[in-house]
Image (cartoon, rainbow, N blue to C red):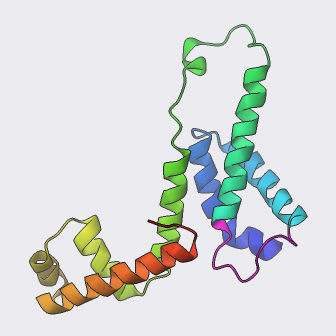
Amino acid sequence: MSALYREYHRPLLAFVIRLTAGDRQWAEDVVQETMIRAWRSAEQLDPESVSLMPWLATVARRIVIDDRRRRDARPHESGDGPLETMPVPDEMEGLLHQVVVSEALKALSPAHREILNETILRDRSVNDAAEALGIPVGTVKSRVYYAVRALRIALEERGVTA
């Protein structure tokens, strides 16, 4: 359990801070409750899994939703300002996808991460990427091809399908 906490505490906390709109105290409570639920469900977790982050993120997201529902079920206390009751768009699915894609990118080789960073994330052409990296254009093309294949496999291992 302590190894699970050491490995996933930081990324899970970063994810939950975004879910709680920057409320660090609430986020830490959610992370703690998530870890307790992971401990209680240890026999159900797959030790062979590449990453437990999708499971942990789903549990944390549900805890945040439950907390919000519990707060909304009570009558509002007097003195609440108008900004506190404004609805906030639900961006949790997008955040979860960002975490999963980030983990999948970490699973790639440094050369594959570098080529995807240059071509896709920086939106450079094959020629510009070749010039920036100091490698031939043909090498850039083949690395992009194999990097995208490796990324697709890494995402499928994490449960993401097209």
Quadrant housing residue 50: bottom right
Q: Residue at x 53, y 29 (%)?
A: 88
Residue 27 or 156: which is nearer the viewer? 156
Quadrant of the drawing holding the N terminus: bottom right
Q: Residue at x 45, y 75 (%)?
A: 105
Q: Residue at x 52, y 66 (%)?
A: 160
Quadrant of the drawing holding the C terminus: bottom left
Q: Residue at x 68, y 79 (%)?
A: 49
Residue 6 or 90: which is nearer the viewer? 90
The stretch of residues the image draws in magenta is 42-53
Residue 132 appears in view: yes
Instruction: Please determine whether, in this image, residue 6 is positioned above or below residue 99.
Output: below
Quadrant housing residue 20: top right
In the image, taking residue 149 as reference, residue 106 lies left or right, namely right
Name the main secondary structure of what is drawn in magenta. Answer: loop
**Is residue 124 located in the magenta-colored stretch of the structure?**
no
In the image, taking residue 56 as reference, residue 137 lies left or right, namely left
